[in-house]
């Protein structure tokens, strides 16, 4: 489960990004999160891809909403070769 504490160092590093002439604000982080957008999951995706898409969506929504949001991939059976 993703913890908000894991995102705080990321948010801090974004705000203190070296070499930037203008500090990055929380509003800027929200704009970036909006621009990245969500990956539309598909049952045709591998289990790992579905899990990673859910994790990315969780991180994006946590940044946008300013509070922890957790999405989980649906139960999945790995494809047998």
Image (cartoon, rainbow, N blue to C red):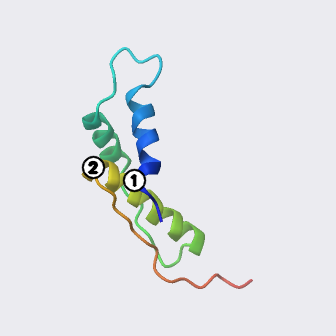
Q: Earlier in the sequence, mark 1 or mark 2?
A: 1
Residue 46 at least partly seen: no
Q: Is residue 37 above or below residue 15?
A: below
Number of marks in the image? 2
Which mark, residue 4? 1
Q: Quadrant of residue 71?
A: bottom left
Residue closer to the observer: 65 or 9: 9
Q: Residue furthest front?
A: 5
Q: Is residue 32 above or below residue 54?
A: above
Q: Can residue 36 be seen here?
A: yes
- Residue in view at x 39 percent, y 39 percent: 11
Residue 68 picture quarter: bottom left
Q: Which mark is residue 70?
A: none
In the rendered image, the vertical position of residue 45 relative to residue 12, given as above or below: below
Identify the residue at image location x=39%, y=53%. Answer: 4
- 46 left or right of 12 in image: right
Residue at 28% from the left image edge and 49% from the top image edge: 64
**Is residue 43 toward the left or the right of residue 34 in the image?**
right
Q: Residue at x 64, y 81 (%)?
A: 78
Say which mark, if any, is on residue 66.
2
Q: Nearer the viewer, mark 1 or mark 2?
A: 1
Q: Residue furthest right?
A: 81
* Residue sitting nearer the eye, 4 or 61: 4
Q: Quadrant of the C terminus?
A: bottom right
């Amino acid at each position: 489960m993703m913890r908000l504490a894991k995102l705080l160092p990321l948010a801090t590093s974004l705000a203190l990004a070296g070499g930037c002439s203008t500090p990055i604000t929380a509003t800027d982080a929200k704009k970036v999160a909006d621009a990245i957008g969500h990956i539309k999951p598909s049952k045709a995706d591998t289990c790992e891809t579905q899990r990673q898409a859910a994790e990315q969506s969780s991180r994006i929504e946590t940044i946008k909403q300013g509070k922890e949001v957790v999405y989980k991939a649906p139960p999945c059976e790995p494809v047998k070769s």
